[in-house]
Amino acid sequence: MSASLFDMKELDAKVRYGNLVQEILKHDKAYYSKDAPEISDASYDKLRRELEKIELAHPEFITPDSPTQTVGAVPSKGFKKVRHALPMLSLSNVFSEDDVQDFLDRIRRFLGMSKNESVELLAEPKIDGLSCSLRYENRKLVMAATRGDGAEGEDITLNVKTIKDIPHELPENISDILEVRGEIYMGHAEFDALNKAQEEAGKPLFANPRNAAAGSVRQLDVSVTKARPLHFYAYGLGEHEPFSTTQFDTIQILKKLGFQITKGIRVFDSLKDIMENYEQVLEGRSSLGYDIDGVVYKVNDLKLQTRLGYVSRAPRWATAHKFPAEQAVTKIKDIDIQVGRTGALTPVARLEPITVGGVVVSNATLHNKDEIERKGVRIGDMVVVQRAGDVIPQVVRVLKEKRDGNEQIFIFPERCPACDSLAIREGDDVVMRCTGGLVCPAQAVERLKHFVSRLAFDIEGLGSKIIEQFYEEGLIKSPSDIFKLEEKNKVLELPIRKREGWGDLSESNLFKSINEKRKIELNRFIYALGIRQVGEATAKRLAATYGNFNALKQNIIKAQDCNSDSYEELLNIEDIGSVIADDLIGFFAEDHNLEILAELDNQLEIKEYQAPDMVNSSIVGKILVFTGTLEKMSRQEAKAKAESLGAKVSGSVSKKTDLVIAGQDAGSKLKKAKSLGVEVLSEEEWIALYE
Ligand code: IVH
């Protein structure tokens, strides 16, 4: 009896929920798109409050179109963009003792140290918040910025000045320019109190303390930030004059200057101690009063940090040892196939929504066909899902004991669900790929999404949903259509602003953000093309090698002849082997791609590559070859140094080589350099070039 009563209640709640969603969406449209609200603010707030209450009690009801999932996001417009004097890096992750060992081995190898030489690591808990850079000039706080894409963030100075932990003026001048980097976060008790107050005031609730902190900082109305209980702790530096020799001392000095630092900072030099500390921090996690999601390790010696430098966007000298992923049990309602930008067919489990570590999860990846078979996943199965940090949620295992016989085996399709082309596996690749290439609409849409994504053109306002909508309506079919949108809009039967959900303002904002991107850096442009296996780092290397887009295109076209110098030059680029070379050559051999490039050329200005950090360097743009054994550094360190000075490193000597650096026992390459009359430097002379 009571069970059926309960079911009734739940059913009622679900029906009410559906009605509320529809009703609120209707009022949103009336208010935002038509500027003609049909109810008072107070009545509207009441509906929202009721919706949020149901969502809190039944997170499994939440649909992607719920107003809490769409509206209410803080507009990012209104904050000024600022370039960071030094990039704000992110961290690589490790998950196990073996990973930590690998991290240490990589450091030793890079520095040319022997296997048993000890490396001192500083360990500090990793608080889960949002990173912020504070710039002090002559002791005064002049700028606070979010991380953004690492190179450019948003100016949040006024908001940050309301945070009590952040000094406006430093007691001592240890560096005329001092950039302090750290994390803004909110504690558990404060988060609970805030959500309670939000609920009472009929405002949206935050999913977790990190979202609450981020939402509180990025407020155009500073008084809102001020009312929020935010904290800041310092973990490092941006631009500054050197004033210490270790990471540990740096942090202690920051503490003396008035900054909070994390509790539990320690220095270790053995893997055993590092792991013991990790276990301790993990155990003490729940009694801290704020969220931490791992332990960060940093090489303590700052000189070594400088030598190690960074790859792509993460330092070689630091990593985050993440806590185990959080898990939960839920049901697989269905399995869909997603078609990626390069045609990969990825099975995705549609789940009964479930909260995993503070976030509602309704999809999880099943990776590929083999993985479904290996795990024995069926539609209708109860499964364990896990979510670690920002990684896509995964299905860990099936609870076979919970089966009732109604589960269905999933048949992996042999054809692409989007274009019906045959799907095949190439060689021993585990991935099934659609062979539709250019005719496949799903691939086209994914390529467009990639084209406008953050590390590519970074066009604000052109999110995934809008790309899908515009593609379907035929407004954007190929990348150049994006730049013709404004022009086209004038002759459209149905102008963009008349479409559902669009106002005059969002339309003009969109055109503005598109027009801002008509001038683009070469490496971003290369990355945007979405050539298979050409990620951010490879795109940068290609940009550095060829300097401008035309040279890149011509040389890769010439490289179709694998006996050409161009082919050799391509293979000489760090990290480019014959497989990536084939993908690049294949891309430029495709007429359709050349047409797209020609059309883009009419719309865009692709800037020439500008090497970073090249002040005072005499080797900008030069082609270097290292040969023989270097004594003071590993080959990897030498290459990284050369690249940071704006040079290109090649693996073989040719008439294009500018400089050969010959270590001990150099052989044939040195001989060849001499016969071609290429300048040769010893290791000492090479070091003297930059020290
Ligand atoms: S160091 C140069 N230390 O984690 C290394 N980051 O996952 C850059 N974070 O963007 C970061 N606690 O926002 C560092 N003790 C800590 C940290 C920390 C939290 C955040 C930071 C960074 C992100 C990378």
Image (cartoon, rainbow, N blue to C red):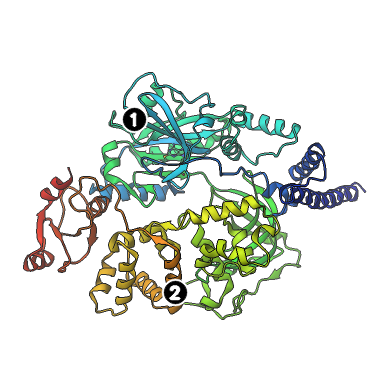
Mark 2 vs mark 1, CA separation in Å: 47 Å
Check disc 2 and report the residue beneath it. Answer: 593
**Residue 320 to residue 630: above or below:** above
Residue 280: x %, y % from top left = 48, 35
Question: Is ligand 1 less than 8 Å from the beta carbon at label 1?
Answer: no
Q: Quadrant of the C terminus?
A: top left
Q: Is residue 89 visible?
A: yes
First in sequence: mark 2 vs mark 1: 1
The quarter of the rendering in which ligand 1 is drawn is: top left
In-image side of 581 versus 679 (left or right): right
Decide if residue 535 is in sight here.
no
Horizontal side of 116 relative to 656 (left or right) equals right
Q: CB atoms at circles 2 and 1 under 8 Å apart? A: no
In this view, the residue farthest toward the top is 171
Q: Is residue 10 above or below residue 589?
A: above
Who's the residue at 36% across and 61% down the image? Answer: 538
Residue at 39%, 72% in the rendered image: 583
Count the marks: how many? 2
Q: Which mark is residue 177?
A: 1
User: In screen coordinates, is 224 left or right of 605?
Assistant: right
Left or right position of 352 against 340: right
Q: Nearer the viewer, residue 38 or 387?
A: 38
Q: Amino acid at mark 1?
A: Ile
Say if 657 sits above or below 618 in the image: below
